[in-house]
Amino acid sequence: MSAVRHDFDGRPIIVGGGIAGLMTALHLAPEPVVLLSRLPLGDGTSSTLAQGGLAASLGEDDDPAQHLADTLAAGDGLCDVEAARGIVDEAPAAIASLTRFGVRFDRAGEGALQLGLEAAHGRRRIVHAGGDGTGREVMRALCAAVRQTPSITVLEAVEARRLIVDEGTVAGLLVARRDGLSAFATRRVVLATGGTGGLFLDTTNPLGNWGQGLALAARAGAEFVDLEFIQFHPTALAGAARPMRLVSEAVRGEGAVLIDELGRRFLEHLPGAELAPRDRVARSVWGHLAAGHSVFLDARRLSGGEFALRFPAIDAFCKDAGLDPARQPVPVRPAVHYHMGGVATDLSGRSSVPGLWACGEVACTGLHGANRLASNSLSEAAVMARRVAEDVAGTADRVGRPAAVPAVSPSPDPGAVRPILSSALGVMRDGRGLENAVAALFRLVQAGGTAGDPAAVGLMIAVAALRREESRGAHWRDDFPQTDEVPRRTRLDFDTAVKAARALSHDKTAILARSA
């Protein structure tokens, strides 16, 4: 039996210690809030690994309208224009907020912010910190600010396991700690748990980030949007290390090119070449690899000292792998990097379940559409953290004992799910592979156990991908290569995904019976 703890009754609970979670907590101050971190604060987050930076229209030759236009073009028809406009408009203010929280952004000689260029951006608008160590510097400052804020209680080594829902409304949260399970009574929960890269074999995400927030929301009955859209970064360092090391798009922004084993720039035919939108570059790299070629990122036009100064982290891990990026091409391949879909939210981060908010990669605001524009994600997290905090603060918590505490399975393990999703939901997809994935994931969901929650997340993604019978942005179907004239969003919840899987299983059984 789980004990219900009342020491934090009435306080909002934030699940996740990346940029989205930390900034939400800071913006809620001085209201008391509890922040749950699965690992020691700052560890195991995609935010810490972020190299690229934050996109904001800060240059004299730039403005939010141009930033919006680039965002919409990359999103391939699926961006929510109102959401995107609001977020890019507020991105400069979010940079200012981060500066106030102590982030030391890179600056030019005159003190102005140094702006970088990344793929599909029409202007230099990427704000960096420590060269390619943006995430590490942002997390350093935010973790320090959180530690110094008396109203924020940080609970580390705590894993959120189930939302407690009473008559359709959040009433509490069940968590696992070293000393067992306990439940917190709260009617305000913010999910800031990051993405789903840990469900795949080749990923730049921490392997522990397998979609915990999506699982929590799914079991609570929340609605999801566009789960099929998963961005593959085209230039992860090829090798055995997992997670894979990311070779930032900013390297290409400074003039590096992609070549094959013969030294040919095989992307010259692609509009934008190396700086085309990520989905197009990733498919081109994937296709070149599938044709038997090797692919390398050639940054030799940058001198050794220049490369190491501009990209110190990349320079270091390449050299650890026996490569000198200033002297030799670096082998690369696509890897899962970012999930554009997620918990459906409004412009304040509210989900379809009262009392549940989502912020950061776990959420789908509509900013990214079918293909995220580089460095928009951290900007989105920073902007939405303030909005979520304001909405949570304006929502009264009706303190009360939660209803019956739900049963939970043993600690989740995504190991059985990774090969299924990696095979069927890669850069290129087809109907037969997706149907097989739905069937395999449905069996894991029915079996429960340690694979149950990861399989539930994977099942929803696979069903969404199977339903989208077109190719758009990061979702490419070999059997449906056309793009529909009228864009549409994919909306579903966990029950819908289960019904679809059961119907597919029934149809296959009937076909086999008729052919016997």
Image: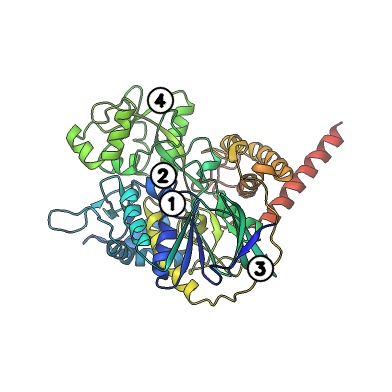
- Mark 2, secondary structure of its residue: helix
Picture layout, residue 415 above or below residue 221: above
- Mark 1, secondary structure of its residue: loop
Residue type at numbered disc 2: Arg
- Dot placed on the residue nearer the N-terminal end, 3 or 4: 4
In front: label 2 or label 3? 3
Residue 487 appears in the picture as rendered: no
User: In terms of image quadrants, where is residue 447?
Assistant: top right
- The residue sitting at 52% across, 35% down in the picture is 201
Disc number for residue 402: 3
Q: Residues within 10 Å of mark 3 (few under 14, many from 20)?
A: some
Residue type at numbered disc 3: Pro
- Mark 2 and mark 4: Cα distance apart in space: 19 Å
Residue type at numbered disc 4: Ser
- In x, y percent, where is residue 99? 27, 62
Q: Is residue 98 left or right of residue 205?
A: left
Q: Which residue is mark 1?
A: 372
Q: Residues within 10 Å of mark 1 (few under 14, many from 20)?
A: many
Q: Quadrant of the C terminus?
A: top right
Choose between 292 and 174: the one closer to the eye.
Answer: 174
Choose between 27 and 340: the one closer to the eye.
Answer: 27
Q: Which residue is mark 4?
A: 294
Disc number for residue 278: 2
- Dot placed on the residue nearer the N-terminal end, 2 or 1: 2
Contact between labelled residues 1 and 2, with CB atoms less than 8 Å apart:
yes
Choose between 391 and 6: the one closer to the eye.
Answer: 6
